[in-house]
Amino acid sequence: MKLIASKCPKIIRWELTNQCNLSCPHCRHHALEKRKSDKYPEFYKTKYQFTEEAIKALIEEVAHYKPSFTLNVANEPTIGNNFKYALREIKRHNLSGTFNTNGLKLTKDLTQFLAEIGWDSVTVSVDATTPESLMKARGIPFLDQVHEAVFNLLEARGNRDFPRVGVTFVDCHCNHDEIDDFIDFWKKHVDFIRTTGFIQDLIPDVEMIGGVDDRSIVPIDRLPCKQLFTDIVIRANGDVTRCLITSESPTLSDTIVGNIFNDGGVLNVWNNSEFKALRDSHNQGNSCSIKYCDSCDYWIETQDMNLVETEDMLIRTPSPYTKFYNVKSKLKNWDKDRVHDRQGMIVECLID
């Protein structure tokens, strides 16, 4: 199998600010032990924010190609100075977008704003069924406050179709036994539940996902990594890292493939020679010779979407790292072709 990239990325992973208001223990970027370390990157010690001018320019550059925006890299998007402005501009151009949030800033004012502009999709990181396990997973015990954020959003939406509301669960050893109870509770309230595997620093080892004990699920024949052909990762200072995994180390110069401010914009970076060389190596079966790619399992997301339908759920599994539980009675606001909650397979990038 070979993949081909279109002129513009299908998904723009965009960091409006590089800051976060939590220090979740499992976070590859801002965990408390990382913040206290002398190895904590200078990139995070300096606050970067996209200006309104830069936001407007980026969206206008790519709007013709109708990409989907994901407003997360290593940050809490709702604390960005120009968060609302970015969302308004995305919707003004009739584009789709999503973001994941810890929910602490999902006030009634903000949830009302999201409903009024018809924002496509919001997922709230809940990750637990008890305050004790939330403390282990996210470093905070405020489960009631996180729940309130989700219900604020549902209340603000009312009878509108959007935003599509979901909750996420990062599957770690500390909370793995709670998944079934988590799904049983939230399927009564939200449109979808997303479970994701824990990814350790720079090495997305599939064996680290809760419940996976061996490598038997990894195909023998390695495939090109879909991310290189569909997703661009833009940091708050304009740097573009080769993928989401390498974005965790923003000071590693060998993971940066360009800067949208210095190198002529999103499309120039996306189509530059360095990106092309990475894609060619993957298509030629040489990804194991590339630093960071060689020890990464995330390429298994290139496999076909697995679909299972139950009495009340449409379960879509793009890879062992991610599973979407869509509540069948709440599918009217989901359009897989707009990939605003990252469930769509970009089939047009696949060639034999």
Image: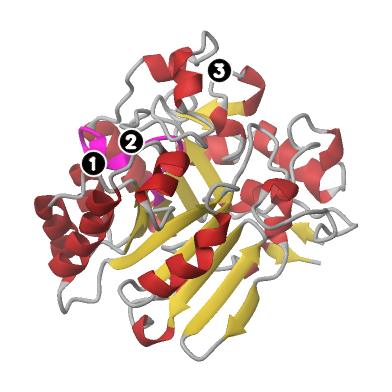
Q: Nearer the viewer, residue 141 or 233?
A: 141
- Percent x, y of residue 152: 17, 60
Residue at coordinates 44% horizontally, 24% vertically from top-left? 32
Q: Quadrant of the C terminus?
A: bottom right
Q: Residues within 10 Å of mark 2 (few under 14, many from 20)?
A: many
State yes or no: residue 262 in magenta: no
Measured Cα–Cα span from mark 1 to mark 3? 25 Å
Q: Which residue is mark 3?
A: 251
- Percent x, y of residue 347: 63, 69
Q: Quadrant of the N terminus?
A: bottom right
Residue flagged by tag 3: what amino acid is it? Thr
Q: Which residue is mark 2?
A: 16
Q: Are marks 1 and 2 in contact (CB under 8 Å)?
A: yes
Q: Which residue is mark 1?
A: 83
Mark sitting earlier along the chain (1/2) = 2
Mark sitting earlier along the chain (1/3) = 1
Mark sitting earlier along the chain (3/2) = 2
Q: Are marks 1 and 3 in contact (CB under 8 Å)?
A: no
Above or below, 242 relative to 146: above
Q: Secondary structure at mark 2?
A: loop
Q: Nearer the viewer, residue 103 or 140?
A: 140
Residue flagged by tag 1: what amino acid is it? Phe
Measured Cα–Cα span from mark 3 to mark 2? 18 Å
Whether residue 207 is visible to the viewer of this picture, yes or no, is yes
Give the magenta part as a residue range: 70-82
Q: Nearer the viewer, residue 175 or 165?
A: 175
Q: Secondary structure at mark 1?
A: helix
Q: Residues within 10 Å of mark 1 (few under 14, many from 20)?
A: some
Whether residue 343 is visible to the viewer of this picture, yes or no, is no
- Percent x, y of residue 300: 73, 56
- Percent x, y of residue 293: 75, 37
Q: Could you tell whether 121 is left or right of 172 in the image?
A: left
